Amino acid sequence: MARHVPRHQRVADQIQRELAQLIRDEVRDTRLGMLTLTAVRVSPDLSHAKVFFTTMDPAQKTVALEVLGGAAPHLRSLLGRLMRLRITPQLHFVYDESIERGAHMSAVISAALARDAALRGEEAGEGEEAAADDDSEGRA
């Protein structure tokens, strides 16, 4: 038996697919570089949609927000024609910082592991030197 997925989630998934294609094909602003739509959250009454995106260059996020915000009404009208919804959600674009946060957390964890390995290496090195000293005393 198929699992029940709430309608607003199915609409959000469809909006993400359609918007990705519309942004690629319809938004002609040259300032808009490579971007990825990471998620869409739609309110239960389908009146608002938060569209989360990331850019290849994090420095371009303000430009991308400006371009997408300006294109939002046009994208909404195109989306309404494609999806044939009674109410087409208002589009609110939000920069998704989860990718950057994830990369930062990964770097912090890697640095902590490297520091831990260096400390263990020093402890092992001290233990080997002490064992070598004990061994040389026994031969003398």
Image (cartoon, grey):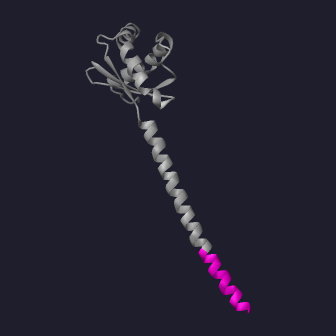
Q: Is residue 87 left or right of residue 104?
A: left
Q: Residue at x 36, y 12 (%)?
A: 76
In the image shown, does 108 or 6 lie closer to the viewer? 108
Q: Residue at x 47, y 31 (%)?
A: 58
Q: Residue furthest right?
A: 139
Mark count: 0
Q: Residue furthest bottom?
A: 140
Q: Position of residue 129 (x, y in %)?
A: 64, 78
Q: Residue at x 48, y 52 (%)?
A: 109
Q: Which residues are magenta?
A: 126-140
Q: Quadrant of residue 122?
A: bottom right
In the image shown, does 102 or 38 lie closer to the viewer? 102
Q: Position of residue 44 (x, y in %)?
A: 27, 24
Q: Position of residue 103 (x, y in %)?
A: 48, 42
Main SS of the magenta segment?
helix
Judge whether residue 17 is colored magenta: no
Judge whether residue 138 is colored magenta: yes
Q: Is residue 31 above or below residue 38?
A: above
Q: Residue at x 60, y 72 (%)?
A: 124
Instruction: Locate the C terminus and report the quarter of the image it occupies.
Output: bottom right
Q: Quadrant of residue 131?
A: bottom right
Q: Quadrant of residue 114?
A: bottom right
Q: Is residue 7 above or below residue 98?
A: above
Q: Is residue 68 left or right of residue 127?
A: left
